């Protein structure tokens, strides 16, 4: 099977680089006139995915908002992931998993590969048990987005801390990801998460040869200009991610479609 990086390059060429988040915040369910229960969750998420998964290259369901409803919520998540893939989008499941090697193998079996019960194309992972603990998920052609420099204001103290080798924690994660992607023909399978809200110059991404998920665009305040300042004019390999700023235009599918198209256009304009 073609690796995730190559599939992503193809998808972005066809549909652009916006990553649309499916984040069923309780407040958004209220705004859409839906109940805060598994039925409301399902209506919200399937309406969103029906529209967004036909427009963008990557959709990113936020697992936490589904897990919050217990097993019925996880069942909805499984349907959302399948539905999105059927509509031609790649699914990046935002689950931020990471554990000792043997447990990481179980997370990999849960979400990646054809036998996975919730089969995503890529997942977000946390490297804070050591980058090497992610080994069970590496090398199988599946997509991983490793948290490097996240968009939240609390992150800088830890992620910009200097290691004994003089690099920041975040830079060393980027460099480990780059090692995994070395020699990949188009784009490697191992991406990093770098918030669109961080300061330009904090990280050197030039050797990554992999995708960059850039959340923080939209509701968290980062703009297209911020994205360009951080990642360069053409945003090569960068997936700006927006959830609330698009979803607030629902539940009308036409308004939702217009909003996602406007956001896509803003990235190329
Ligand atoms: O550094 C990170 C990593 C992940 N996220 C996730 O992205 C979305 C952002 O939602 P918005 O509504 O566009 O703010 C959410 O699921 C986060 O968990 C992030 O924001 N920052």
Image (tube, rainbow, N blue to C red):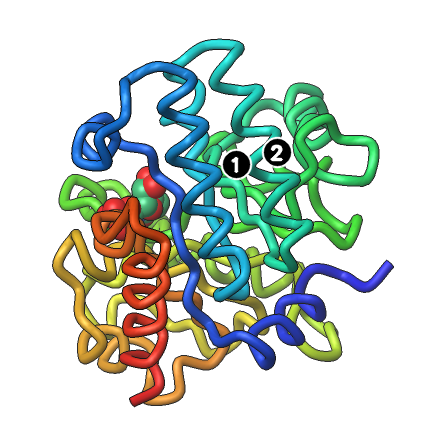
Q: Residue at x 20, y 48 (%)?
A: 156
Question: On the image, which quarter does residue 228 sit in?
Answer: bottom left
In this rendering, the answer to whether 2 lies above or below 220 is below
Quadrant location of the N terminus in the rendered image: bottom right
Question: On the image, which quarter does residue 234 sit in?
Answer: bottom left
Q: Residue at x 69, y 60 (%)?
A: 4
Q: Is residue 66 left or right of residue 130?
A: left
For this orientation, the residue located farthest to the right is 1
- Badge 2 local density, few (<14 within 10 Å), some, or many (20+)? many
Question: Considering the numbered disc 1 on the image, is that residue within a helix, a strand or a loop?
Answer: loop
Q: Is residue 48 left or right of residue 86?
A: left
In this rendering, the answer to whether 183 lies above or below 28 is below
Q: Residue at x 73, y 35 (%)?
A: 136
Closer to us: 7 or 244: 244
Q: Which residue is mark 1?
A: 130
Task: Indicate yes or no: mark 1 CB to ligand 1 under 8 Å.
Answer: no
Give the x, y percent position of residue 223: 17, 70
Task: Indicate yes or no: mark 2 CB to ligand 1 under 8 Å.
Answer: no
In this rendering, the answer to whether 215 lies above or below 127 is below
Q: Residue at x 56, y 43 (%)?
A: 123
Question: On the image, which quarter does residue 224 sit in?
Answer: bottom left
Q: Is residue 160 left or right of residue 140?
A: left
Give the x, y percent position of residue 269: 29, 89
Q: Which residue is mark 2?
A: 133
Closer to us: 51 or 104: 51
Tag 2 near tag 1, CB within 8 Å? yes
- Badge 1 local density, few (<14 within 10 Å), some, or many (20+)? some
Give the x, y percent position of residue 226: 19, 74
Give the x, y percent position of residue 151: 25, 51
Answer yes or no: is residue 260 visible.
yes
Q: CA distance from mark 2 to mark 1?
A: 6 Å
| Ligand 1 positioned in quadrant | top left
């Amino acid at each position: 099977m073609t690796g995730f990086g190559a599939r992503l390059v193809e998808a972005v060429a066809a549909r652009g680089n916006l990553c649309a988040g499916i984040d069923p915040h309780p407040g958004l369910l209220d705004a859409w006139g839906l109940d805060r229960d598994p039925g409301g969750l399902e209506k919200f998420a399937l309406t969103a995915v029906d529209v967004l998964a036909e427009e963008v290259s990557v959709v990113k369901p936020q697992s936490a908002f589904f897990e919050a409803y217990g097993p019925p919520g996880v069942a909805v998540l499984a349907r959302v992931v399948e539905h999105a893939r059927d509509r031609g989008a790649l699914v990046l499941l935002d689950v931020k998993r990471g554990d000792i090697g043997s447990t990481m193998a179980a997370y990999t079996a849960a979400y990646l590969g054809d036998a996975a019960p919730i089969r995503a194309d890529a997942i977000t992972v946390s490297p804070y048990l050591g980058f090497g603990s992610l080994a069970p998920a590496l090398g199988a052609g599946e997509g991983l987005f490793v948290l490097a420099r996240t968009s939240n204001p609390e992150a800088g103290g830890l992620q910009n801390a200097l290691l004994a080798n003089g690099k920041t924690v975040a830079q060393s994660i980027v460099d480990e990801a780059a090692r995994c992607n070395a020699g990949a023909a188009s784009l490697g399978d191992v991406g990093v998460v770098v918030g669109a809200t961080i300061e330009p110059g904090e990280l050197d991404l030039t050797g990554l040869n992999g995708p960059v998920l850039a959340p923080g665009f939209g509701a968290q305040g980062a703009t297209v200009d911020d994205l360009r300042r951080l990642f360069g004019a053409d945003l090569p390999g960068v997936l700006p991610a927006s959830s609330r700023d698009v979803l607030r235009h629902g539940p009308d599918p036409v308004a939702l479609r217009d909003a996602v198209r406007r956001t896509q256009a803003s990235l190329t304009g």
